[in-house]
Amino acid sequence: MSLPLLDIRQLKASYGEAEVLHGIDLVVLQGEFVCIIGANTAGKSTILRSISRLVPKSSGTIRFGEVDLTKLASHDIPALGIAHVPEGRQIFPEMTVEENLLLGAFTARKATDLPVRIADVLDLFPRLRERYGQLAGTLSGGEQQMVAVGRALMLRPKLLLLDEPSHGLAPKVVEEMHEAFKIIHGRGTSILLVEQNVELALEVATRGYVLESGVVTLEGSAAELHANPAVVTAYLGL
Ligand SMILES: Nc1ncnc2c1ncn2[C@@H]1O[C@H](COP(=O)(O)OP(=O)(O)OP(=O)(O)O)[C@@H](O)[C@H]1O
Ligand SMILES: [Mg+2]
């Protein structure tokens, strides 16, 4: 049986006086591909931001292996092997693809295998090979998302946090992106994916949580959630 890699208990988070997560329990086992689905403003990004210690006010525990992340600051997180691809990508438009990728490896500056890591990213996203010396701001939305994911992979993370990576992308690019996620997962990286597009999320993830207004209302395997009438009515529009 797999052990929990990430174990979140009774997580509450607030912005100012407004509590937006009201006691979340969520687990990602070693090697799992888990999704969090839910509508606009449900608090999905806030869960990922809490893991990365980017939310100033939170309580509860977030265990990553033996470490309680709530005791740490955001700058401690990458070194543990957690990489976060934030909502809206947030790559550096005035830097080249190469420079953006190298930034992702900042905790591994002394690593002698940087060329190998770069080659792995370019094998996963061959389009970036053609764009390697180009300023990231001149790339298409899909290519910029590949840079954002590639930058996170430069860390060789144990856990990859993905915040709406398909948002605003053409269906063909979404498909390429999902193929890449399956490959990354297949190589042993655990993934926690946030998606507003429930159909897409349940296609790639193996297990999921439904988040509504800061509360987990349902959890189950992707197949169970896909067949659940409440999910079908609220999110799949069938
Ligand atoms: N920096 C902030 N300051 C104040 N309120 C915030 C901040 N960030 C988020 N919120 C509020 O917290 C709630 C949850 O936001 P969050 O971004 O986690 O939702 P989400 O599920 O990711 O939504 P979306 O699908 O639109 O990305 C929302 O009501 C939002 O307005
Ligand atoms: Mg969000």
Image: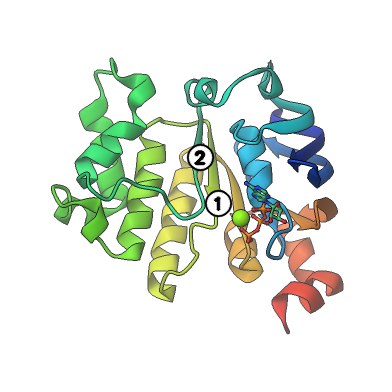
Is 152 on the left-hand or right-hand side of 10?
left
Residue 42 sits in quarter: bottom right
Which residue occupies the foreground of this view, 236 or 183? 236
Disc 1 vs disc 2: Cβ atoms closer than 8 Å? yes
Q: Residue at x 32, y 49 (%)?
A: 147
User: Which class describes the residues within 10 Å of circle 1: few (<14), some (14-19), or many (20+)?
Assistant: many
Q: Could you say whether the residue bearing mark 2 is in a helix, strand or loop? A: strand
- The spot of residue 134 in percent (x, y) is 15, 52
- The spot of residue 23 in percent (x, y) is 85, 40
Q: Is residue 7 above or below residue 183?
A: above
Query: Quick check: is the Cβ at mark 1 less than 8 Å away from ligand 2?
Result: yes
Q: Is residue 221 above or below residue 5?
A: below
Is 108 on the left-hand or right-hand side of 3?
left
**Where does label 1 land, which residue?**
163
Which residue occupies the foreground of this view, 58 or 158? 58
Label 1 – label 2 distance at C-alpha: 8 Å
Query: Quick check: is the Cβ at mark 2 less than 8 Å away from ligand 2?
Result: no
Is 108 on the left-hand or right-hand side of 236?
left
**Where does label 2 land, which residue?**
84
User: Which class describes the residues within 10 Å of circle 2: few (<14), some (14-19), or many (20+)?
Assistant: many
Which quadrant: the N terminus?
top right
Which quadrant: the C terminus?
bottom right
In the rendered image, the residue lying farthest to the bottom is 238
- Identify which amino acid the numbered label 2 is placed on: His
- Identify which amino acid the numbered label 1 is placed on: Asp
Q: Earlier in the sequence, mark 1 or mark 2?
A: 2
Residue 72 sits in quarter: top right
- The spot of residue 104 in percent (x, y) is 35, 33
State the count of labels: 2
Is 91 on the left-hand or right-hand side of 30?
left
The answer, for residue 145, to whether it is visible in the render is yes
In the rendered image, the residue lying farthest to the front is 17
